[in-house]
Image (cartoon, grey):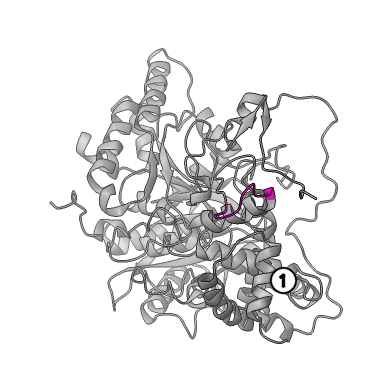
Amino acid sequence: MSALSRDDVAHLAGLARIDLSDVELDRMVGELGVILESVAKVQEVAAEDIEPMSHPLPLTNVTRPDVVRPSLGAEAALSGAPQQEQQRFSVPRILDED
Amino acid sequence: MNSDITRLSAAELAHALDSREVSSVEVVQAHLDRIATVDADVHAYLHVDGEGALAAAQAVDQRRASGEDLHVLAGVPIAVKDVMVTKGLPTTCGSKILKGWIPPYDATVVSRLKAAGMPILGKTNMDEFAMGSSTEHSAYGPTHNPWDLTRIPGGSGGGSSAVVAAYEAPWAIGTDTGGSIRQPASVTGTVGVKPTYGGVSRYGLVALASSLDQAGPCTRTVLDAALLHSVIGGYDPMDSTSINAPVPSVVEAARNADVKGLKVGVIKELGGEGYQAGVRARFDESVALLQEAGAEIVEVSCPSFDYALAAYYLILPSEASSNLAKFDAMRYGLRVLPEGIDDPSAEQVMAATRDAGFGDEVKRRIILGTYALSSGYYDAYYGQAQKVRRLIAGDFDRAFGQVDVLVSPTAPTTAFKLGDKLDDPMSMYLQDVATIPANLAGVPGMSLPSGLAEEDGLPTGIQILAPATKDERLYNVGAALEKMLVDKWGGSLLAKAPELTAKGA
């Protein structure tokens, strides 16, 4: 496993929707390198036949009865919105112009 | 008794309230006065709700006066970590991205506190989104350790541990994803419990890593922790990972406090190299006390624990990168427009907002998690970490086949100086080396004070671990050990902490 390049980190930041500045990118490349080197220790474990564990509880398909129950009203749900209009969340444009 | 109110344990306060020696309003006011005196220095609260707490106290006093049957803890105030949503009270998770956000609903834990009649004093400081071991990653400035204001109070729940240690609240709610209740308890001379995963509802707990997060009590005594655990614990249909079973009989166990004939396993992999001498010495003493009290001590090996930290720092960032995707500048929280772009897209606004609103540690972990989950690297990182997690759970299973509880030091060191580890993320992560295995496996753990390290005079902690759903064993062993230690010290460990005075006084 080769170390992360500056371009790799910039690509990851894009995927994570974080607009990192050049200074932040420079610093993050070094820090992530150190951390990745350390966590790569998990690869020392020979684990061919081990079942991955995603969760401490052996639960599957937890459901509830399909009945209507009270929920937040529109006013409460919108109360933290940066911008709202006509009882809706108001958001920047979501499509490109062309 | 007004001047001493803040020194009482929650159990003592409950008794004094029940016998009408004090009113809840007096108790709340005494804590608000204490907060006004010391919190400028400690900075453990992000928000104090004096008005709301006094109103809740007054309501309880009236109900008591009218002869109503009240919850045994009615009128005892509490502080809540700022990662739990509280209707009408700001909830920031220590992040700029949620500055000023007022949730429209209560977390189940908060609903249960209110139902018991417990006034909420305020919200406590924390590392941003619970990522850290020192509270230095709070966007609102660090909390200071009441034992030495130049040192860290632990993290992420350093605000909750500090309010308890500084008598700014009788007790507090914390959350523990890799040690955020137990390590702060260890470095502040207080008690902290991470219950079995699923034992306390996560509904309304702003998620860091959903398969690891668990809320629990931060207190000054083991009995108080048991009392609080029994209020907040138990099945909640609003949390699909909630255990549908009665709360373990933790209060009974704390009162029983008898280790005779119990098998206690000392974890070989936790406590050697990398652990401060004073931490080790106090730990060995505690183990010797348990032996004197009739416990059988054996050494137990958990070889996969050597890989726990690495697995944790892949699993946690992976889950966090997914959980924190909801901070998109659209429905709540901050919205920042990118500079120099006319009519920016939603995506550009989201990226600008997340850059401005998240701190360095949060960005680091989101990007690390994005990497660990990305195609081509998934098997080598996240997938492999999940396999290690299975091995760690297996180590616990085998160990608990031989012993009733396991013990280790809680944290490898006492409280370090503010600023010491900020430039070295890996060395900060090592603070959690002994607490992380419990979160990965979902088993319950407690930290309680084991004494003061000789070299620096600062508190050390011992960790007790039990099998999943056997939380009562923590309280039985913890209370027995606490009693012997307090006898030996001639009072609580916190009584040895230096007196805090008003700023500049």
Q: Which residue is mark 1?
A: B372
Q: In the image, what residue occupies the spot 30% across and 51% down?
A: B166
Position of residue B25 measured from the top left corner of the image (x, y, whole percent): 32, 26
Nearest to the observer: residue B5 or residue B145: B145
Badge 1 amino acid: Ala
In this figure, what is the number of numbered marks? 1
Name the magenta segment's main secondary structure.
loop
- Image quadrant where one finds the N terminus of chain B: top left
Which span is picked out in magenta? Answer: B338-346
Position of residue B114 measured from the top left corner of the image (x, y, whole percent): 51, 30
- Regarding residue B267, the answer to whether it shows in the image is yes
Nearest to the observer: residue B258 or residue B338: B338
Does the magenta portion include B95? no
Q: Residues within 10 Å of mark 1 (few under 14, many from 20)?
A: many
Image quadrant in which you'd find residue B59: top left
Image quadrant in which you'd find residue B439: bottom right
Q: Is residue B396 above or below residue A31?
A: above
Q: Residue at the far left: name it.
A: B505
Does the magenta portion include B342? yes
- Regarding residue B262, the answer to whether it shows in the image is no
Image quadrant in which you'd find residue B23: top left
Position of residue B357 measured from the top left corner of the image (x, y, whole percent): 52, 53
Judged left or right of residue B383, residue B425 is left
Mark 1 chain: B
